[in-house]
Image (cartoon, rainbow, N blue to C red):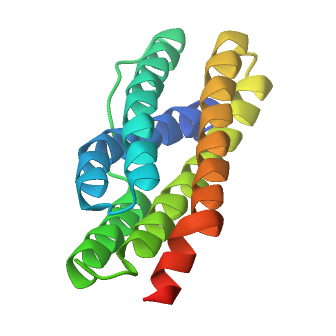
Amino acid sequence: MAKAPKNLDDLFHDTLKDIYFAEKKILATLPKMAKAAQNQELKAAFEKHYTETEGQVDRLEQVFAIIKQKPQGKTCAAIVGITKEGAEIMQEYKGSPALDAGLLAAAQAVEHYEISRYGTLRTWAEELGLDDAVTLLDATLDEEEATDEALTKIAETAVNQQAEAA
């Protein structure tokens, strides 16, 4: 008997599992980044985003409930790679004036991935008529975009200059 072809519902659920894994991985990584950061504003941004990420995980669990699925992650190779790069930067640039610039770049790579995923999920939720999920995903997308903007500001007003000046 042939398998039924996969549809948008399936893709939505698979992508939801992907970002759920990613958010859990990010929760494990942010404290290490905050500890490594030398710039106090960057350290505070990582700590703030940790708290936001906890709320984002909670919202994802609500989305799983809306589609009547158990919250579970599926290994996200993209986020594994991005966080591995961040770990390499922490090791290779430890104590260096360029460390914070590298941490910031790694964090923005994560944010851009998340913005992409949440934008896609929100659009698919609209298509699937999952209005409550749209609201939840949109709230997270707004937070991710705000975090990206805050990181850009920190880079442009302090961290990049500190890395270059040394």
Query: With respect to residue 68, does 19 lie above or below?
Result: below
- Front-lying residue, 127 or 28: 28
* 155 is higher (above) or lower (below) than 46: below
- Quarter of the rendering occupied by the N terminus: top left
Residue at x 25%, y 46% (from the top left corner): 31
Left or right of 80? Residue 6 is right
Identify the residue shown where x is 57% and y is 40%.
11
- Residue shown at 24%/84% (left/top)? 92
How far from the left and from the top, in percent, is residue 21? 35, 42
Q: Is residue 3 visible?
A: no
**Residue at the image point whose x is 47% and y is 73% from the top:** 101
- In the image, residue 132 lies at what x, y percent? 66, 10
Residue closest to the far front: 165
Q: Quadrant of residue 28?
A: top left
Residue 19 location in percent, x, y?
46, 41
How far across and down, in percent of the image, does residue 108 sit? 54, 60
Quadrant position of the C terminus in the picture = bottom left
Q: Looking at this view, is 19 or 159 the one in front?
A: 159
Relative to 55, does residue 120 appear above or below in the rendering?
A: below
104 vs 110, nearest the viewer:
104
Q: Nearer the viewer, residue 150 or 111?
A: 150
Q: Would you place residue 12 above or below residue 74 in this image?
A: above
Q: Quadrant of residue 124?
A: top right
**Residue 51 showing in the rendered view:** yes
